[in-house]
Image (cartoon, rainbow, N blue to C red):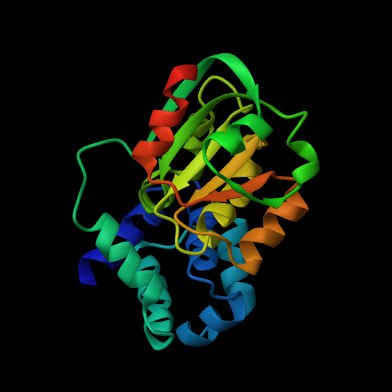
Amino acid sequence: MEKLALIIAGEIALSKDPGSSMRKWRELFGVSQAELAQELGVSPSTISDYECGRRKSPGIGVVRRLVEALIEIDKRRGGKFVKQLERQIVRGYDRAPFENHDFYAAMTAEEFAEKIEANVITHPELLPTTKIFGYTLIDSIRTITEVNVHDYMKLFGSTPQRALIFTGVTTGRSPMIALKIGRFCVDMLPAMVVLQGITKPDIVAEKIAENEGILLVTTQLEPKEIVRRLLEFE
C-alpha cells in the first residue's frame, strides 16, 4: 500500500493540472469533498479550492496525506478499490495501457454490438444511425492511473467516432468518471463505450452515460475474442 500511495501522489504532483488530478482520484475512490475534508481535518472549501485551482498547488507532502486519506477511507469500506489498483498498477507492465485500431470501412453501432455480443445499457436508439470507424482497447485501471487527463485525446486515435472498450471492468464507475472528467479537457465523446467483463454497470456509471448521451454497452467476451471478431474490419 505504501508503494500505491507514492504512485498516486506522484501522478497528482507531476500533473499539469494537479487540481483536476486530485478531483479525479477523489471521485474514483467514491469519496465526497466533505468526507475527505473531515478525514484530513480541513474544511470542504479547502478541498474545493485545490480542485478548482483557486488555491496554490499543494506540495508532495500535502498530496501524500490526501492520498493516504483516500486509501484509509477505502480500507474502512472493505478496501475493494485499493485491492484492484494494487493488483494492476503496482506489478508493472511492458505494454501500453491502450491500443488504437481503425477500420477500413465504417460499421453501424448495431453491427458492432452484435459482433461482440453486447448488452445495450443506454441510448439504444443510437444503434442504427451511429457510425463506428474503429476502436480503442483500453486497460481500464492502467489508463485511469497512468494517462494524464490532458492526454485523453490519444484514446480517440484518428477520430472520436469509435468504440472505447474498457477491459477488466468490475463496476464501470471508474471508466465513466474518467471520461466525464477528461471531457473538460478534450470536449469529445466516443461513439460507443464498451465495458468488458460485466453484464450491468453500477448506477453511477449508467447515470453518467445517460446524462452525457453516451451509447453504453457491456460484453462478457474476452478481449482476445473481441479483437478476433473485429479483425476483418481493421
Foreground of the two, 19 or 123: 123
Residue at far right of view: 125
Can residue 49 be seen in this snapshot? yes
Foreground of the two, 211 or 107: 107
Residue at far top of view: 104
* Residue 94 drawn at (x, y percent): 20, 39
User: Which of the 4 image quarters holds residue 93?
Assistant: top left
Residue at left offset 58%, top offset 62%: 201
Residue at left offset 62%, top offset 28%: 160
Can residue 54 be seen in this snapshot? no
Q: Is residue 87 left or right of residue 225?
A: left
Residue at left offset 40%, top offset 70%: 81
Query: Which quadrant is home to the N terminus?
Result: bottom left
Residue at left offset 57%, top offset 71%: 47
User: Which of the 4 image quarters holds residue 59?
Assistant: bottom left
* Residue 128 drawn at (x, y percent): 76, 31
* Residue 17 drawn at (x, y percent): 51, 48
Foreground of the two, 154 or 169: 169
Q: Is residue 123 left or right of residue 190?
A: right
Foreground of the two, 129 or 208: 129
User: Which of the 4 image quarters holds residue 62?
Assistant: bottom left
* Residue 217 drawn at (x, y percent): 61, 48
